[in-house]
Amino acid sequence: MDSKEKIAIGGSFLLMTVFFGAVVFAMTGFGVEVPDCVTDVKPFTESSVTSTGPHRYEVHSIARMWAFDPYEIEVPPGSEVDLYLTSADVVHGFNIEGKNVNLMAIPGQVNYTRVKFNEPGEYKIVCHEYCGINHHAMSGVVKVAYTPTTNEEGGN
Amino acid sequence: MELMSMKVDKSLKRLTLIELAVPVTLLIVGILAGLMQVLFRAGMIQANDLGGIEYYQALTLHGVVNAIVFTTFFAIAFGNTLVSYALNMKLNMKYAWLSAIVMLIGTVTAAIAILAGKASVLYTFYPPLQAHPSFYIGVVLLVVGSWIGFWNWIPMYVRWRKANPGTKTPMAVVGIFTTFIVWQIATLPVAYEVLVLLLPWSLGWTDTVNIMLARTLFWFFGHPLVYFWLLPAYVMYYTMLPRLAGGKLFSDMAGRMVFMMFIVFSIPVGTHHQFMEPGIGSQWKLVHAFFTFAVAIPSLVTAFTMAASLEYAGRKNGATGLFGWVKKLPYFDEKRWLFPYLLVGLVIFIFGGISGIINSSYNLNIIVHNTSWMPGHFHMTVAGPVFLAFIGMSLFLVEKVGGKELQMKKLAMLVPYIWMVGLFLFSSGLMRGGLHGEPRRTNMGLTYLNPDSPMFRPEWKIYVLLTAIGGIIMTIAMLVYFVVFFRTLLSRQVREEVLEFPLSEAYHNEPAGVFANFKPWIVAASVLIIATYIPVFYDVARTTAFGAPAYDPAIPMSLKELKAAEEAADEPAEEQSSEEAQGEATDTEVEQQTEAGSTTDSTGN
Ligand code: HEM
Ligand SMILES: [Cu+2]
Ligand SMILES: [Cu+2]
């Protein structure tokens, strides 16, 4: 084998090792994780947004043909949200742009991620998995604002 | 260029031309569907359908025809001819025809279901969206037909090995066999998915399907599927591109190593398509990400070997200086019109490969999963190197095996260049849009790109416009290709039909060593597959609470609920319908739950 070729092969191994190291670093250093198994929460049929502590919320979101329930999730700025997601019918997607929230909603399964909303604003939720002929009409929104209902939290 | 040519009998000639003409004809529909998609997504056409073909029905056609039917037929036609040529042996035509007929029946069966609007489930056919049984049957037949095609080459190769002890297996045969070994292993889980889970369910014999199990089986197949597409292109790169460029393959050993690495690492990587799904432990996803990085290595090595081979060719053509060879390649040489089809694909694949590494980077996948970034990426793989190599080689085969002269050579030679320009615009639009949250698989013109809709996203306008312009240019390239293909096919025969491929010699030509046999690599692959998939299936089994009933893509309730509702509406007699409802409730706990709204005490098994 040509010596330059050996360098190229070795270099390829090295490059991919470095990339893999970067992935692991993003995971351990910055806590950017992909969904894991959820066994403590069973697939639910009722949606909810509940305050579980100061600046802490738990959201149970249900995707169904062709809307998210709840359509609108309201939390004050600075909230940390435990987001649980399931589907009532077919497979759906749940993507919040710019927010490291990208989940598949699977019937018979619960998906989970934790996300923090610091800046006030409207964060759009897009269903990004084909879920039937009205898939393109399926979206939702997270409203992050100081509103009367969440005043006590927002005041802190 | 003097090539060794081999006589081809009429039967193989006819078979090959059919195996090319049928999928290329279907491809016309597939490409028009692509054009429809870019126009609909950009909001240039705001509708549910065009001429009675609904958006998602067209998208199903697009995926199935372009990525499954065309590629599978081509791989078989290419394998039949190349294996015969490289081994200098005669193909058993009986099984070759059987393979083609089974694939044809499968294709027609599935096509009828899609065209009738009974299978708008996209080419991934994720349950619980359900297609008509004939769709699943058609897919199975297509795959079985390709198996028969492959099995037909095995005894031939075994005989060749016996007759040529100690001779290295020709690289072309190593490549084709690698393609089909990967295909053979990978199609087993999807056969299980379709035959055991989906088909009985679609026939109404079973009520529910375990969705995560089905998806996991699908992607067990789905990633190696992309190597089934890519590897025939790699065969052309390793065995023909150097010769077409006027040189030699830089290293024979590297080629053999690359193919064997694909056998080992193509399959234990499937859950990288499922990073964002529940039900699979994230540690196992990381393991699959790790092996995905391993399977990138043979492609990086290929990049080196191809660059080195082209440099060698350029220097032989008289180039000097460090990069002078780049200018000395036959970009527009009519005698070597196949060269740009392969070279341009290789250039596109640089970007397809880089974006692929991004996708498989575990947590980075959060940014891109299921956004339009994805079609942006994979059109630079499957619609880049793969597609250009396949359509180029189709022309080449029609010319040689058909004994024709390629028509409109100059235009034919421009196709890959036009395609590349279109593709880069198309993909950059999709990928940039994807980074801003633009979804894939979405008829966006009705909502996100509709100024009258509350969902309007004006910030995506620029990206969908770029995509549409690129898509129109790609369509133009294809129109040229179709004209060239059919004019050549229908032109008069001008010379004897032959089997002839521009196979390259190797510059560094060493004994094959550890890469001489497939067996150890197949064993290694099996061990890796078992080790990486057992924990995944274990997780899926323990996290699935219940299976899902069937859904029609057009109706937001399960088919069972629909039937119950219809019967209730038809039958005024209260008694009977309540009786039925009871019977059904005991059938599936799912429905019971939905009705009762109970969550905590559900079937947590
Ligand atoms: C004129 C050429 C083409 C155009 C304009 C085009 C356009 C598109 C567009 C816009 C999408 C995304 C649609 C959506 O997600 O809503 C798409 C998806 C796709 N395309 Fe193409 N395409 C072309 C050629 C090809 C070729 C040649 C292949 C393969 C050989 C291919 C394979 C696919 C596949 C597999 C999908 C994914 C389908 C799915 O998500 O279910 N395309 N195409
Ligand atoms: Cu959807
Ligand atoms: Cu993959």
Image (tube, rainbow, N blue to C red):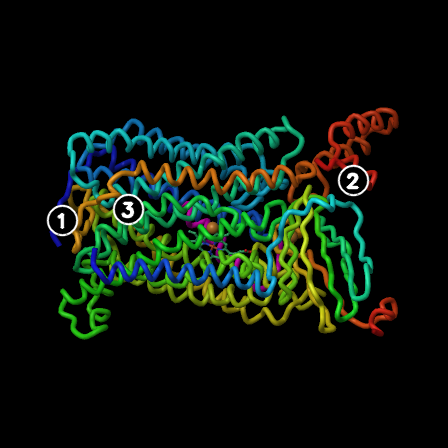
Mark 3 Cα within 10 Å, few/some/many (few <14, many 20+)? many
The residue where tag 1 is placed is: B3
The kind of secondary structure element at disc 1 is: loop
Task: Look at discs 1 and 2 and give the one toward the viewer.
Answer: 2
Task: Look at discs 3 and 2 and give the one toward the viewer.
Answer: 2
Q: Is residue A62 one of those drawn in magenta?
A: no
- Chain letter of mark 3 equals B
Query: Range of the magenta residues?
Result: B25-48
Q: Are marks 1 and 3 on the same chain?
A: yes
Estimate the x, y position of residue B555 in percent, counting from the top left. 69, 43
Which quadrant of the view contains residue B176?
A: top left
Mark 2 Cα within 10 Å, few/some/many (few <14, many 20+)? some
Q: Amino acid at mark 2?
A: Thr
Compute the Cα span from label 1 to label 3. 22 Å
Compute the Cα span from label 1 to label 2. 69 Å
The residue where tag 3 is placed is: B489
Estimate the x, y position of residue B440 in percent, counting from the top left. 56, 57
Q: Amino acid at mark 3?
A: Leu
